[in-house]
Amino acid sequence: MKNAIRRLRISYGNLKIKYKLFLLVSWIMIISFLFTFLGLQYAFQIYDEQLYSKSSQVLSTTSNSIEIELKNMEDVSYKILTDPQIQQYLSKLNADGSEYEKFVLRTQMNDKLLSYVNKEEYILSVNLVDANGEEYVAGPRAIKLKEKQKIDITSAANEADGSNIWINPKENGFTIVTAREIKDYNNLSFEKLGTLIIFINMDKLVGNTLAGSKKIDGNFLIADQQGIIFPTDPPLHLKDTVLDSHSGYQIKEIGEKKYFQVYRKSNYFDWGYVNAIPFNQVFKDISLIKSLLVFVFILMFIFVTIFGMRFARNITIPLENLVAGIQQMSAGDFKEARKEVLKSSIQDDEVGKLQQNFHTMIQQIDELINENYSKQLTIKETEFKALQAQINPHFLYNTLESINWLAKANGQAQISNMVESLGFLLRNSISLKKPLITIEEELSTVKNYIIIQQYRFEDRLDFHMEVDSDLNKFIIPKLTLQPLVENAIHYALEPMIEPCKIRIYSITHDDSFSLIVEDNGPGMEPQILEKIKNKEIKTRGQGVGLTNINDRIKLSFGEKYGITIESAPNEGTKVIIVLPYDKGEEYV
């Protein structure tokens, strides 16, 4: 987390000033909008609570009226099943008797049931099923049960063991059925005499209740966990409404519309009451305010963005031109640097004064450079020739000594070869016309030098050259590799008894290449190596020779090129020369 914050801070710090100003203004606007929006949301939430409270009160009044009527139906069912005459009729029907007697009893049973139905305006049909499965139906809309319905309802009533149950037989197209098992109470045997089933006209019951109380805006529904109980044909977009597990309210999207739904759980039954109010109807003004707020914020953001960026550009464009001028100056192009600074008009403010001073500074620096250019060229050429004259001629003495020794001990062919190699070396070292030569020419000098040294050291000198031929045409200061090979022979081969391996090889890089002179000699102590790197040792060979070569490379190609040394006691020495891919076309 800390690293992420740190990266964000670094990224913000690296942004241009105009973008920083833009982000600052944007954050101020966003925070202001959030505070305003949250405040409105809090006000809207209070409004929602008040709306819920009012809707809940109306819903509670309506649902209580409905439940009173439904409880009344329970009382009616209890009166019917405890009616002495019905008890008597059912007992006789269950006993043995003639068909005529049973016909009379059935007629009397229907008349008795009809007397109850006529007193209740919400009863559609009263169905009584005796112990033998015989069904008696009475009511304004006599409903004959299907066999499966009869079995299901009587089974459910039997399980309730005399308690009232409520059923929603949707396949009949009616909403509510109350059923109860009839037992024999006359002689307290409590044997089952039958099952009482009452179909209730919910359309009429709810319609009268709503008409007799304050009308609820929206869609009034009765639902359980499976779906809608009432009305039997609800609006298509509300068919999937189910009772919420808790009383309360929520904003719910149904189809493509939003509804403000108020829930209330029934106190007596396994269902609840829902009032679904179209959201746009209730929250039309609130939605308009929210949309207007967002629209105004977007307009303000666009306005601030346009004018803020223009304001920021007036400040940052001169600074950007100044930065571009500094970059051109660092690249050495003072003419373009002046053009960049003068791209924008110079004002008389702090930035304008900075531009004026920078322009004056560029002119002064340009004049100084032009004035000293010729002097620097002269100094560079003088230093180059002075350094070139410092080449250590130590190897010439060793060569003469070898020739003298061979003249006494061997034939004329060897002397001839050595003299030819010596002549080649002398011509190349004495000539000052070409301070830079190709890699191929420098390697030829090394080969001739090695020919002489191999006659001297014979099998003790194990020399190999593995330089990529593609590098032959690139240039190198004259006498760069030969002094390094001479140092390897002097400091690695001469102190050793066993053969000494000296190798020259190359490594290529993307924008440069390296020539490495490596030996397996005794190496150097870290302290000695550090003093050589710091130019603290001024002795023959590695002291003056390495410094001389390194300075000539830097003078010829730049400070990024030169020599590095890697060495450790008993692990040999490696001298690495880093050079550019330069064929000499631009050398003056």
Image: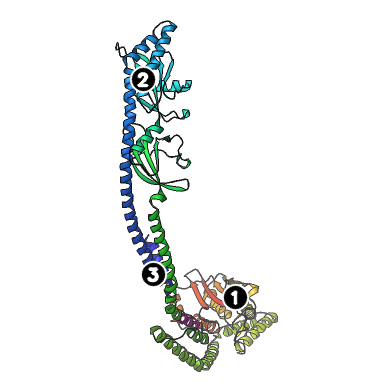
Q: CA distance from mark 1 to mark 2?
A: 142 Å
Is residue 296 inside the magenta stretch?
Answer: no
Q: Residue 244 lies in what quarter of the image?
A: top left
| Residue behind mark 1 | 457
Q: CA distance from mark 1 to mark 3?
A: 81 Å
| Residue behind mark 2 | 115
380 or 115, which is in the foreground? 115
Q: Residues within 10 Å of mark 3 (few under 14, many from 20)?
A: some
Q: Does residue 257 lie above or below 88 as drawn?
A: below
Is residue 329 inside the magenta stretch?
Answer: yes
Q: Residues within 10 Å of mark 2 (few under 14, many from 20)?
A: few
Asked whether the viewer can see residue 163, the reply is no
Q: Which numbered disc, 1 or 3, marks the residue that appears first in the sequence?
A: 3
Q: Residue at x 62, y 76 (%)?
A: 454
Residue 205: x, y in percent?
A: 37, 32
225 or 71, which is in the foreground? 71
Q: Which amino acid does the dot numbered 1 rest on?
A: Phe
| Magenta span | 320-331
Q: Does residue 378 lie above or below 24 as drawn?
A: below
Q: Depth-wise, is mark 1 or mark 3 nearer the camera?
A: 3
Q: Which amino acid does the dot numbered 2 rest on?
A: Ser
Residue 227: x, y in percent?
A: 43, 36
Q: CA distance from mark 3 to mark 2?
A: 83 Å
Magenta stretch prevailing secondary structure:
helix
Tag 1 secondary structure? helix
Q: Which numbered disc, 3 or 2, marks the residue that appears first in the sequence?
A: 3
Residue 515: x, y in percent?
A: 57, 74
Q: Depth-wise, is mark 1 or mark 2 nearer the camera?
A: 2
